[in-house]
Amino acid sequence: MNTTNEMVNPWNTDKPVSYSGMWIGTELCQASIRKKISGSEDDWLTYVIKNYMGPALGKSEAIKPRKDYSVLILGANEGWIERTLCSHGFVGKIIASDIADKALERARQKIEELGYTNVKYVVANLNKDVFEGPFDFIFAEGVLHHIEKIEECLERLSDSLSENGILIAPEFVGPVRFQLPEEQVRWINASLNVLPKALRPFSGDPEGHLPGTPQDNARVYYVPPTEQSIIDIDPSEALSGPKLRELFPQIFDILEQKGFGGTLLSYMTGHFDFERANKDLIAQDWLEVLVKIEDTLIKTGILQDEFTFYIMGKKKKS
Ligand SMILES: C[S@@+](CC[C@H](N)C(=O)[O-])C[C@H]1O[C@@H](n2cnc3c(N)ncnc32)[C@H](O)[C@@H]1O
């Protein structure tokens, strides 16, 4: 059994991770997420750049010189966040960090090729390592739910924020190791059963334009993974989602909190043909139906968002 994050990390292989075949690999889900977070076509990072980083980018009045602003990026992986910040004119110090040394090395090479000299790469484990701040901006995209000692980690991050600094965290806040409650599994399967079989794993079925029969649906359906199967793939996967929900408001002042779904869709990899939804209009239409079902379940309070975009500040002492 693999027990430590150092032993298995699927985010640290010889090639960048591909999101194709997953909900977030589809243009339609990406557009829906962008809308939920920014209310527009902007992705979350563009939204943060426009709404929070004006002074640091020389676009609005600042309390210090541009080069004195500082950024810490956690879970930097292949490095898209620091490259985007630099391309928008961020000239201050950036520490880009991850436990994934191979991915981080590729990110380092890319930033070097682009000629930016203000980014330093640091391989670090958020369960124990400390970053010397203060930082004006800490970015943590999809990394904090991997951290076992999450309370200590968040306390350290709070300590390393500057007085008016912000922590930006689009995060998975769903169940530990994807051990979904029975009602959520029922909704996942009810939604899959609505689809034409051609978009589900019924390859070559002559009735591809029809939904599955009760017999089909009793044979092909979503079953949540066992905890052990998740541990075998990545021992740190989905470790602290519920704790993030609880600890964020205790440790930080929440400035923004916007759910962006994932409650059904993130579990449908292999059960719905997401790749096809990028290519043909029929699959796209059916994906829209799935998005609508998920949105309705969340809006009516039956299920909760499993992914949430947070912007947080240091807790103000009262
Ligand atoms: C879901 S990926 C985040 C995606 C990333 N933000 C990107 O730009 O694609 C999770 C990241 O958390 C990192 N990670 C997992 N456990 C960690 C730990 N203990 N300390 C630091 N990083 C960790 C992984 O190496 C991976 O890069």
Image (tube, helix red, strand yellow):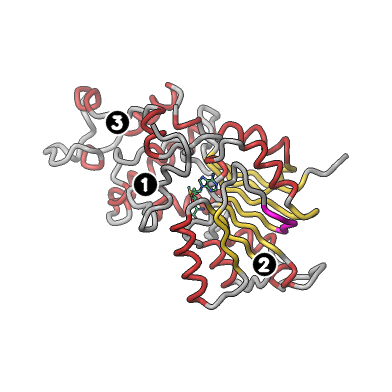
At horizontal 40% and vertical 55% (from top left) the residue drawn is 27
In the picture provided, is 104 more to the left or to the right than 95? Answer: left
The three-letter code of the residue at mark 3 reads: Asn
- Sequence-first disc among 3 and 1: 1
Magenta residues (range): 131-136
Disc 1: which residue: 22
In this view, the residue farthest toward the right is 318
Disc 3: which residue: 193
Label 3: how many Cα within 10 Å (few below 14, some 14–19, many 20+): some
* Residue 60: numbered disc: none
Q: Position of residue 259 (x, y in %)?
A: 57, 42
Disc 2: which residue: 93
Looking at the picture, tell me which residue is in the foreground, 297 or 307.
Answer: 307
Disc nearest the viewer among 3 and 2: 2
Residue 45 lies in quadrant = bottom right
Q: Secondary structure at mark 3?
A: helix
